[in-house]
Image (cartoon, grey):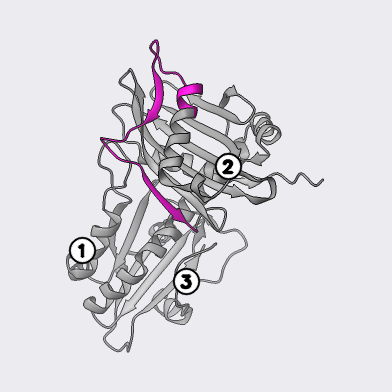
Amino acid sequence: MKHSFRLILGFLGLVMFLTQCKEPTPRIARSVGATSELLVVTQSEDQWEGMAGEAIRNYFGQEQYGLPQPEALFRIANINVSNLSDMFRKHRNILVVEIDPKLDEAVVETRTDLWSKPQRVVKIAAASQQQWVEAFEKQKDGIRLLYDKSERERLMNIYRPTADYKVIEEVSKTLGIKLMIPEGFFVAKNEGNFMWIRKEVADYSQGLILYTLPYRDTLDLSDNRIIQVRDSLLQKFIPGPSEGSFMSTDKEFIKPEIKRVSHFVTDFAIENRGVWNVVGDFMAGPYLAYTIVDQKHGRLITVEGYVYAPNKDKRDYLRQMEAILYSLEMVDDTK
């Protein structure tokens, strides 16, 4: 996995801290915990109520951009290290706070699948809470990427056994890409270089919007061009429920957030996060899209997931779509 940061790997300190760690067993337990949940392990109530806990809550508890109603990035739970039983050690995302006055400098350590799978354990040790917060502020974005990856891995473990290979094969033959699409989705529209794939249940909807376009120059990757192309295709191919209505991008209530990222499937991708709405109707919801350059075939590939869940929280539904987007692979057309 590509990261924009480097974690200091000092596993000796982690092993000394986690005294009940045993040798890995051949069959590791499945991780537990609700979707988008982070377990913070502290040595005392003062740490949780003090500077360290405040820094964690301010960052992981901040509102996720692009959701119609406020929802935090992660649901945060706290436990004292003395209560870290077998049950809690199986949690999927764990952040450990250690204050040790004997330390000369802060140390950030990370372990994958320590007590369960998939699991990410991150420990930051420092001589004081002030030093701890300084280390956390430097590494927090990278740490979040690790927890996001853990969330996607859990969802993929659920999706793989239920994959709908009929839909997957149609996407592969049409667009030359592969996505791990679970059961419940169906192809609603296939226009050759544009596909709309939907999941409709009683109280919510999820969808994939996939399309390819010729790549001419870097202007095709500009913010305005990304939105312009998206809106033109949605108006053409995705009608709303009433006569003359169609899906579009909300540009007033929550403006699209478009940025270049290096943590997607490829080294370079355009992430587009925001809210879709229906012109001529009252439907809306969050979406997340990635656009990459397929140099081999001279084209742009966009994969998007969206959610419609009126009167419901939407963060976890959108995270499910994010996991599918991150399963993107190029089809080997040399065989």
Query: What is the quadrant of residue 121 in the picture?
Result: bottom left
Amino acid carrying mark 3 in the image: Cys
Question: Residue 262 vs residue 250: left or right?
Answer: right
Magenta residue span? 233-262
* Residue ID for mark 2: 301
Image spot of residue 329 (x, y percent): 64, 47
Return the mark for residue 21.
3
What's the distance in space between the residues labelled 2 and 3, CA to CA?
Answer: 45 Å
Amino acid carrying mark 1 in the image: Glu
Q: Residue at x 40, y 46 (%)?
A: 35
Q: Please state which of the two labelled residues, at mark 1 or mark 2, is closer to the viewer.
A: 2
Q: Earlier in the sequence, mark 1 or mark 3?
A: 3
Quadrant in which the C terminus is drawn: top right
Residue 231 within the segment the image draws in magenta: no
Q: Please state which of the two labelled residues, at mark 1 or mark 3, is closer to the viewer.
A: 1
Q: Earlier in the sequence, mark 2 or mark 3?
A: 3
Image spot of residue 316 (x, y percent): 39, 41
Mark 3, Cα crowd under 10 Å, few <14 / some 14-19 / many 20+, is some
* Residue ID for mark 1: 54
What's the distance in space between the residues labelled 1 and 3, CA to CA?
Answer: 28 Å
Is residue 20 among what the camera can see? no
